[in-house]
Amino acid sequence: MIKAKEKAKGFASLASITESFGLKRDAYYKYKRRENQRLEIKEKVIAIVKQRRKSLPREGVRKLKKSLKDEFIKANLKIGRDTLFNILREHNMLTLRKKYTSRTTNSLHRFRKYNNIIKNVEITRPNQVWASDITYIRTVKGFCYLALITDMYSRKIIGYDLSNSLELKGCVRALKKALYQANHVDRLVHHSDRGIQYCSNVYTQILKRNKIEISMTEENHCYENAMAERVNGILKGEFYLDQTFTDVTHAKRATKNAIKLYNEVRLHLSLNFKTPNMVYKFTA
């Protein structure tokens, strides 16, 4: 009865299928084993990547391959970049970057504007040049503003402050945090745009008291402060600071966590796949 039903439904035996294609049953079973192995490898890779992305949700393929090298070895997996790319693409796990545009710079003011003195300077050590910038963070009630100071050699964020206005106080707090955390600031240059916060007497006097040279973008163009712009993009693009937070307190918690991961966990291509903390501590 069962065989009759199977024939009525159009079922055929494995022997008849392989015979019709001129194949041997052993070849089919070999193919089946290879296919099962491939599925098992994919499942292991996806599980490992998902675990990593709990902390770095938008880490790209090249960095994943490097950061997960030990995990793949433990799992007895030999995964190349193309294979990893194809697996992530198949499961819609490739990262897409957004472009951000906002204006947080007011350069129409009475304060002195300084020249760009780092234009042709080679950055060879930590605390040689700090890049400063301000970016916006959205909340349900409006914007708050993140002032960042990044060491250009190690890419480490060494000072930051999140406040609900573009007033000078946020930038000053970020600068004071950076000065407190820095090992030494001999022959240091502070580079920024020509915004009123950075040109103000209060801010420049702090720099001068600490014998820090002042450098600013001459054309007020983002390319003259590309490092700071890049850091802004990473924090928003890879650590979800581009979302809308419930309030400033929520945004502050997310920002603190994002900067901690950025400094201590995220690998940088420009640092030969090291973290900013590793480079800053080793060479500072």
Image (cartoon, rainbow, N blue to C red):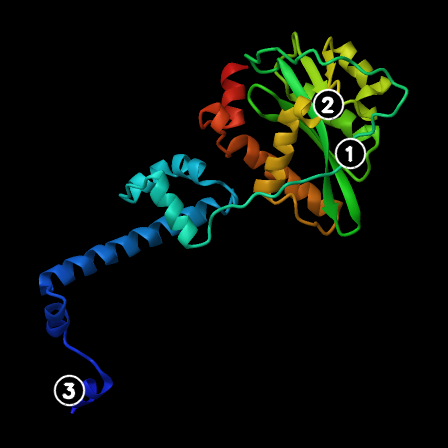
Q: Residue furthest bottom?
A: 1
Tell me which numbered mark, 3 or 1, is placed earlier along the sequence.
3
What element does badge 3 sit on?
helix
In the visual, does 120 lie left or right of 24?
right
Amino acid bearing label 1? Thr
Q: Residue at x 48, y 46 (%)?
A: 53
**Which label belongs to residue 37?**
none
Quarter-wise, where is residue 222 in the image? top right
Write the residue at 42% across / 55% down: 91
Whole-angstrom CA distance, mark 3 to mark 1, is 76 Å
Q: Residues within 10 Å of mark 3 (few under 14, many from 20)?
A: few
Q: Count the marks: how many?
A: 3
> Where residue 6 sits in the image (x, y, percent)?
20, 85
**Residue 158 appears in the figure:** no
Lower position in the chain sequence, tag 3 or tag 2:
3
Quadrant into which the N terminus falls: bottom left
Q: Classify residue 168 as left or right of residue 268.
A: right
Residue at which label 3 appears? 3
Image coords of residue 206 (percent x, y): 79, 16
Within-10-Å neighbours for mark 2: few <14, some 14–19, many 20+: many
Numbered tag placed on residue 175 in the rendering: 2
Sort mark 1 into few (<14), some (14-19) or many (20+) by Cα contacts within 10 Å.
Answer: few
Question: Alpha-carbon distance for marks 3 and 2?
Answer: 81 Å
Identity, as a three-letter code, of the amino acid under mark 2: Leu
* Tag 3: amino acid: Lys
Residue under the image location 57 percent in, 43 percent down: 97
Front one among 82 and 227: 82
Q: Earlier in the sequence, mark 1 or mark 2?
A: 1
> Can you give x and y, in whole percent of width and height, for residue 245 in the image?
70, 49
Residue occupied by mark 1? 104
